[in-house]
Amino acid sequence: MSARPYNFAYLDEQTKRMIRRAILKAIAIPGYQVPFASREMPMPYGWGTGGVQVTAAIIGPSDVLKVIDQGADDTTNAVSIRAFFAKTADVATTTDTTRATIIQTRHRVPETPLTADQILVYQVPIPEPLRFLEPRETETRTMHALAEYGVMHVKLYEDIARHGHIATTYAYPARVADRYIMDPSPIPKFDNPKLDDCPALQLFGAGREKRIYAIPPHTRVVSLDFDDHPFERTKFDAACEFCGSGDSFLDEVVIDDKGGRMFVCSDTDYCQKRQAAMKKDAAE
Amino acid sequence: MYVAVKGGERAIANAHALLADVRRGDRSVPEISPAQIDEQLGLAVDRVMSEGSLHDREIAALAIKQARGDLIEAIFLVRAYRTTMPRFGFAEPLDTGAMAVRRRVSATYKDLPGGQVLGPTFDYTHRLIDFSLREGGEPAPAPTAPADVEAATPRVTDIIAGDDLIERNAASAPGAPVADVTRDPTAFPASRDARLQTLARGDEGFLLGLAYSTQRGYGRNHPFVGEIRFGDVDVEIFVEDLGFAVPLGTLAMTECQMVNQFKGGDGEPARFTRGYGLVFGQSERKAMAMALVDRALRADEFAEERKGPAQDEEFVLSHSDNVQATGFVEHLKLPHYVDFQAELALLRELRREHAAASAKPRAEAAE
């Protein structure tokens, strides 16, 4: 669609400027949640409005956009958001992680390592890592200001006392640049190590909660743990049925009604590239 | 293989086509027009305008048609349209005392200047299904009273305030900045203007439930309906270049002023307190609920113990917006299989460990 009743990338320029100011502040204070005047977007709250606003504020005509949901480019919501930007910003889109300049994601960090030329935009439902321990915003803001994170460690300790493990498997809290504890959004904790010292800029947008935060490139991000219970990445006993990868995050697919299961890569681009490489090797 | 949730591009397009088809329904039934919705389902239009925070009957009616009558969906459409509109200024404060009243009732005085005007109301109707509406037909013209254009209808709260029996409203501060909850993230504690704005666009059902809870003891505040008025109010905007305010048009609005239990002490004589509600169109239930909740949220001002959810500002303001609420509740429909997989992996590990641990003592016992 070329005749646009709306501005480039939907948002008006004043709004983009406001969002960019919030982003700059977020980059200046890694892990700190910057309040911003989140707009009502033409998709529902909780479906990526924060990520969409961040992407709309940073995207330019020469950008190449990739959108993933659960690691996949072809999940319905990823398709819908990609189509939104193709329509309102007329930008090139891709499913190739290496070709993208901006990657908007829900719940995953791509398996392919990111580079300094890329920005990863996370969609965040609940930006406040302390929210389920303290429902009040007035309280949690004070706790962050005073770096008063004892409750979080108590929660993790109680998990260990009860289950023998830290029972948080996604949205696993991490400390950014030795200061703020942040919620990495509901990515599996499998992805947490990728946040640390990442060459790409990582931006987090929470539309409904009206918060933006950031991890600048090459920032230290440490997943919370204890000396005697160090952070552990989720390990799979299986390998991908399609590409044989033994070190990617796997989706479990139910294949029949008799308990049959198979495991496939959640990152579709990563998996397809490996399959293509396997075919090429076989042909040679 | 189970690929239905993936590979969605065509599926989405097809779903949208099906939605459009279902929205239209049986082609042998005449299509409804936005004008019909506006004229004959006007209260739905009022609600969509109020909670959509946009006074535009045509857009609201169109949104209701597009949303197949799902009012929260229609409110969402209006909000997403409104957010792109340029903002060229703030109106002067509305003078609801000068409202051209179509309905006005007070529960505190039997009669009062301007009188009680029932207007178009469901009150006192018997809720019996009117089967004659099935066939349609023109209702008999409603009788009219001679309009007394000179008769003033002063606000009841102003009458009470004349005797100094109700708390005074804060003095107006011309030129003071006005909160705009659509342009600034809410901070707590919220200012009263931000709070009232949030309540005005809050979900009718949510506020109704909260208001009801105050009547049942969760933050009781002994309300009387001082007055409910519905009618047309002029909107004016101050034009810098002209040096005076010019009229922009009129808004149909409902205002509810609750008169609540009195407070005094600390050298102050006892006075009634206020709760305030103001919404677009004829939305009395919403205006009343808003006024009750507004008063409940003023607990701190009157050193009242906050015991009920309706008195908890963060709780009320953070959860009253139905567009936010419906989005987040319904996002659970989106795929979560990555997170679910991570949980499955941990759960299986815990169960493995549990099985190993419970097998051990049995093995020992067998020895």
Image (tube, rainbow, N blue to C red):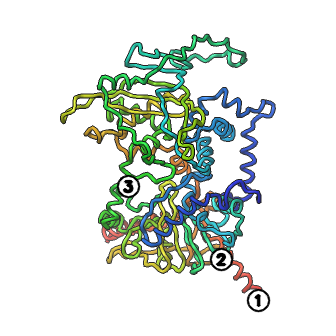
Position of B257 with respect to B282 (left or right) is left
Q: Chain of mark 2?
A: A
**How far across and how far down the image is residue B290, in percent?**
44, 34
Residue at disc 1, secondary structure: loop
Q: CA distance from mark 1 to mark 3?
A: 60 Å
- For label 2, the crowd category at 10 Å Cα-Cα, with few meaning under 14, some 14 to 19 and many 20 or more, is some
Asked if labels 3 and 1 touch by Cβ distance under 8 angstroms, the answer is no
Question: Mark 3 — residue?
Answer: A137
Residue B30 place in picture, x, y as percent: 78, 30
Q: Look at the picture and state if A78 lies above or below B88.
A: below
Q: Residue at x 61, y 10 (%)?
A: B143
- Reading the chain from its start, which is encountered first: label 1 or label 3? 3
Q: Quadrant of the C terminus of chain A?
A: bottom right
Residue under pointer 1 = A284
Residue neighbourhood size for the residue with mark 3, other residues' Cα within 10 Å, grouped as few (<14), some (14–19), many (≥20): some
- Location of residue A81 in the rendering, given as x and y in whole percent from the top left corner: 64, 60
Kindly identify which chain the residue marked by label 3 belongs to: A
The residue at the point 35 percent across, 59 percent down is A140
Labels 3 & 2 near each other (Cβ < 8 A): no
The amino acid type, in three-letter code, at marker 2 is: Cys
Mark 3 secondary-structure assignment: helix
The answer, for residue A252, to whether it is visible in the render is no
Q: Amino acid at mark 1?
A: Glu
